[in-house]
């Protein structure tokens, strides 16, 4: 079986090397395969997605008797502080919402972000309606600024978690119509519209003409609500059924890394 596994890894190697990484077979023990990711894969936020949604799925197709694929630590990780039984606290340890013990499904924290975003959108639309009716005040402008900041930082991090982790992991399970690529394109449009909100708000403050700001804001709010609905009724349903156990833990870890990097950039 080891020869079959090595041959299967060799099939994947060109794709991994194309991104500057590589994979080595470390051991096969009781149908559990251990590999070591090297090169650019070390420290990459998507490395666990590569392992579970890519390598593991491919090896199981070639060798159905395989029960799990595990990742051996890199040489740097083996000599890093905490490697000898002294765990180092994660830079994102305070994010209990993503901790495996805090949630049962891989999509739980993604759904919570949708609910938080919808609360912001509700307040944004209220402020936009007041602007359209020329009954707004400073509080409405502050509400818009808060929402735009939330969308630019928190929601963009959330969409990165979906684009880089969740959607690629769903490819083996949702093959019809390439919905992940459609959702990724929609995220690009949303990103552009979020970016346009800041200059539109600035222009409104300067000119007092809120027509463009209201138009852009309401279109963005509707686009986001439609995006949330599609994700929760298609992507998340499939994810909760298919991405479980060790695979879910690996994907969650990858999403934690994305959130931690965003938090460091913010600070």
Image (cartoon, rainbow, N blue to C red):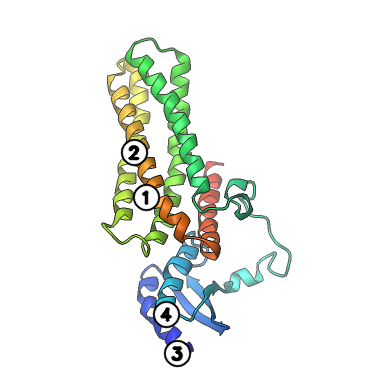
Judge by depth and name the residue closer to the eye, 137 or 57: 57
Q: Is 53 on the left-hand or right-hand side of 92?
A: left
Q: Which residue is mark 2?
A: 226
Looking at the rendered image, the disc whose residue lies closer to the viewer, 1 or 3, is: 1
Front residue of 164/205: it is 164
Distance Cα–Cα, label 4 vs label 3: 10 Å
Q: Position of residue 72 (x, y in %)?
A: 57, 74
Q: Which residue is mark 3?
A: 3
Q: Please rate how many residues cluster around mark 2, counting C-alpha atoms within 10 Å: few if below 14, some from 14 to 19, many from 20.
A: few
Percent position of residue 16, x then y: 40, 71
From the viewer's perspective, is residue 54 above or below residue 242?
A: below
Q: Quick check: marks 1 and 3 in contact, CB under 8 Å?
A: no
Q: CA distance from mark 2 to mark 3?
A: 48 Å
* Secondary structure beneath label 3: helix
Name which residue lies at 43% across and 71% down.
57
Question: In the rendered image, is residue 55 in sight?
Answer: yes
Q: Earlier in the sequence, mark 2 or mark 4?
A: 4
Residue sitting farthest toward the left: 177
Separation of disc 4 and disc 1 at Cα?
31 Å
Residue that carries the numbered disc 1 in the rendered image: 234
Which residue carries the number 4 mark?
Answer: 9
Asked if disc 2 and disc 4 are in contact, CB closer than 8 Å, the reply is no
Question: How far across and down, in percent of the image, does residue 252 sit?
Answer: 53, 56
Residue at screen point 64% across, 72% down:
78
């Amino acid at each position: 079986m080891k020869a079959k596994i090595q041959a299967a890894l060799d099939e994947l190697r060109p794709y991994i090397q194309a991104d500057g990484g590589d994979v080595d077979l470390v051991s096969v023990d009781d149908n559990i395969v251990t590999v070591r990711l090297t090169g650019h894969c070390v420290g990459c936020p998507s490395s666990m997605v590569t392992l579970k949604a890519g390598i593991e799925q491919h090896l199981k197709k070639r060798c159905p008797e395989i029960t799990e694929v595990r990742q051996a630590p890199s040489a740097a990780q083996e000599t890093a502080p905490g490697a000898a039984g002294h765990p180092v606290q994660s830079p994102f340890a305070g994010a209990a919402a993503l901790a495996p013990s805090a949630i049962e499904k891989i999509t739980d924290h993604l759904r919570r972000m949708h609910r938080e975003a919808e609360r912001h959108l509700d307040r944004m639309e209220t402020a936009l309606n007041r602007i359209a009716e020329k009954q707004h005040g400073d509080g409405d402008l502050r509400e818009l600024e808060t929402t735009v900041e939330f969308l630019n930082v928190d929601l963009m991090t959330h969409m990165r978690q979906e684009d880089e982790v969740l959607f690629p992991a769903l490819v083996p399970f949702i093959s019809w119509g390439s919905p992940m690529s459609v959702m990724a394109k929609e995220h690009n449009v949303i990103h552009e519209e979020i970016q346009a909100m800041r200059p539109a708000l600035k222009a409104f403050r300067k000119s007092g003409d809120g027509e463009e700001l209201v138009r852009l804001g309401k279109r963005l709010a509707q686009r986001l609500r439609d995006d949330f609905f599609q994700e929760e009724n298609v992507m998340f349903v499939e994810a909760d059924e298919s991405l479980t156990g060790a695979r879910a833990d690996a994907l969650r870890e990858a999403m934690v890394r994305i959130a931690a990097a965003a938090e460091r950039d913010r600070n």
